[in-house]
Amino acid sequence: MTETAMEIKRRERIVQQEQQEQALEERIPRPVGYRLLILLPDVDEAYESGIAKAESTKHEERVLAPIGAVIDMGKQAYKDKDRFPTGPWCKVGDHVMFRANTGTRFRVDGREFRLMNDDSIEAVVDNPSAITRA
């Protein structure tokens, strides 16, 4: 069966997106030792009312974000049985809460990440959209 022009474009777009995601993954540092790699949520460009946020406001929201998603862990994360006798506090895929200035902040392709120690996690969050900074 012959693909239509629209199907070909769609398939090409999917391949291109997969290549971009792979390239992004290759640029993101891998955590070593007992460190976790956390992806911070994107900051909204405007308030719910539609009013645009100032750059300083968006910067403050990024810097002080208390929630992120665990996307990778170093091989020694949570392996210390004396410090973590009940096992890991979180796993890859969890949304977690941490202190606002915790970890090493960096950006890759406009996305903000943090590398932080395994014991910097303060809570696992089931619904990250329900949490705001006080």
Image (cartoon, grey):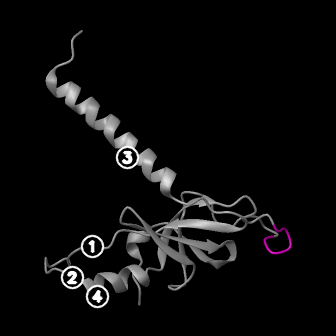
Helix or strand or loop: what does disc 1 sit on? loop
* Mark seen at residue 20: 3
Q: Residues within 10 Å of mark 1 (few under 14, many from 20)?
A: few
* Mark seen at residue 81: none
Toward which corner of the image does residue 36 lie, by quadrant?
bottom right
Q: Is residue 20 in the magenta section? A: no
Q: Which sits earlier in the primary sequence, circle 3 or circle 2? A: 3
Pinpoint residue 22: horizontal percent, then vertical percent: 45, 45
In this view, the mark in front (1 or 3): 3
Q: Are marks 1 and 3 in contact (CB under 8 Å)?
A: no
The residue where tag 2 is placed is 53
- Name the kind of residue labelled 2 in the image: Lys
Q: Which residue is at 61% across, 74% downward?
A: 116
Magenta: predominant secondary structure element? loop
Left or right of 25 on screen, residue 45: left
Helix or strand or loop: what does disc 2 sit on? loop
Q: Which sits earlier in the primary sequence, circle 3 or circle 4? A: 3
- Name the kind of residue labelled 3 in the image: Gln
> Is the residue 75 above or below the residue 97 in the image?
above
Q: Residues within 10 Å of mark 3 (few under 14, many from 20)?
A: few
The residue where tag 4 is placed is 56
Range drawn in magenta: 80-84
The N terminus - image quarter: top left
- The Cα atoms of the two marked residues, 4 and 1, are separated by 13 Å
Q: Are marks 2 and 1 in contact (CB under 8 Å)?
A: yes
Could you tell me if residue 89 is visible in this image?
Answer: no
